[in-house]
Amino acid sequence: MRRSRKTDWMRRLVRENSLSSNDFILPIFVTEGKNKKIPIKTMPEVFRYSVDKLGQIVDRALKLKIPMVAIFPQTNSGLKDSYGSEALNENNLVCKAIRKIKDKYKNEIGIMTDVALDPYTSHGHDGILRNKRILNDETIEILIQQSLLQAQMGSDVIAPSDMMDGRIGEIRQELDNNSLKDIKILSYAVKYASSFYGPFRDAVGSKKSLKGDKKTYQMDFSNSEEALREVALDIKEGADLVMVKPGLPYLDIIKKVKENFKIPVLAYQVSGEYSLLMNGINKGLISENSIYETLMSFKRAGANAIISYFADRIDKIIKN
Ligand code: PBG
């Protein structure tokens, strides 16, 4: 076996997978105010941008030829309530960010927006909470409106991350009924109730408010066959792309989904994965090459694209 590993040119010749900026989606956090670029303590080298400063990071994505950015808002706690009403405000942070990016960049770069109530609810859950239960169908009524609003503002890809049952079909129907047939749906079809979302909840400010856990709607991490049922349902309901989340602890799921369904599969390298790598590197425990190695594992597993907080540095990561 070592004959083919002897020289760099030979290794390149037999290499089975590769990475390019086309494989990435860059998540961007937005915050209120003007002229702001605020570091996120738990996520080294990731920032929250005010809407007027978004150009800085979107320019970077465009320069790197990253196909799409994903917008996540940090909502002021004063705007949160038990129904997440701010989600339906056409002047909320996400809507302002979509309009700003669309206006400036037209169709040069794709915009993806998260559909779920957790950035807007006082209890930090993705749906409506009553008597300690998350209500599925009542939540969907709001998610439909949230999706429609985001699409009308100019979002290209609607990405429900809430894990309510049946929402993909209802959102698809609503978009179609409103002449928004070209708007794509990326379903967070397989989203596990994971401990790896901590830094993200910190970044969007839902960590302190979150009461309890999300185990009644997000998936049990002991299961993999159930993931295939989730994907099958969402495809039937009209999803164009499906996501597996988190990434690294679920490479087996990415592979299984890809083997069973011929649909684009995306991996989300979530905040906890990002921060573990960054902290390990910053402490000198592992080398920076661990980033490239980790990202390549998603490709090996069969992911078509990766949502990663490293995306804005992907040129350096690939070059090294
Ligand atoms: C919320 C949402 C979460 C993430 C993306 N959308 C957090 C959660 O479900 O609690 C996590 C992303 C990350 O950790 O990087 N619907």
Image (cartoon, grey):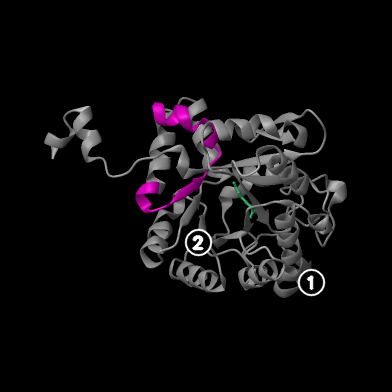
Image height check: is 102 above or below 6?
A: below
Quarter residue 5 falls in: top left
Secondary element type, mark 2: loop
- Decide if residue 154 is on the left or right side of residue 243: right
Residue 74 in view in this figure: no
Give the Cα separation between the discs numbered 2 and 1: 25 Å
Task: Work out whether mark 2 precedes mark 1 in sequence or the reverse, and give the earlier one.
Answer: 1
Find disc 1 in the rendering and name its residue. Answer: 131
Instruction: Residue at 59%, 41% (x, y): give it.
Output: 108
- Decide if residue 123 is on the left or right side of residue 259: right
Residue 173 in view in this figure: yes
Secondary element type, mark 1: loop
Which one is nearer the viewer's eye here, 274 or 255? 255
Which one is nearer the viewer's eye here, 286 or 142? 142
Q: Residues within 10 Å of mark 2 (few under 14, many from 20)?
A: some
Q: Which residues are magenta?
A: 299-320
Find disc 2 in the rendering and name its residue. Answer: 221
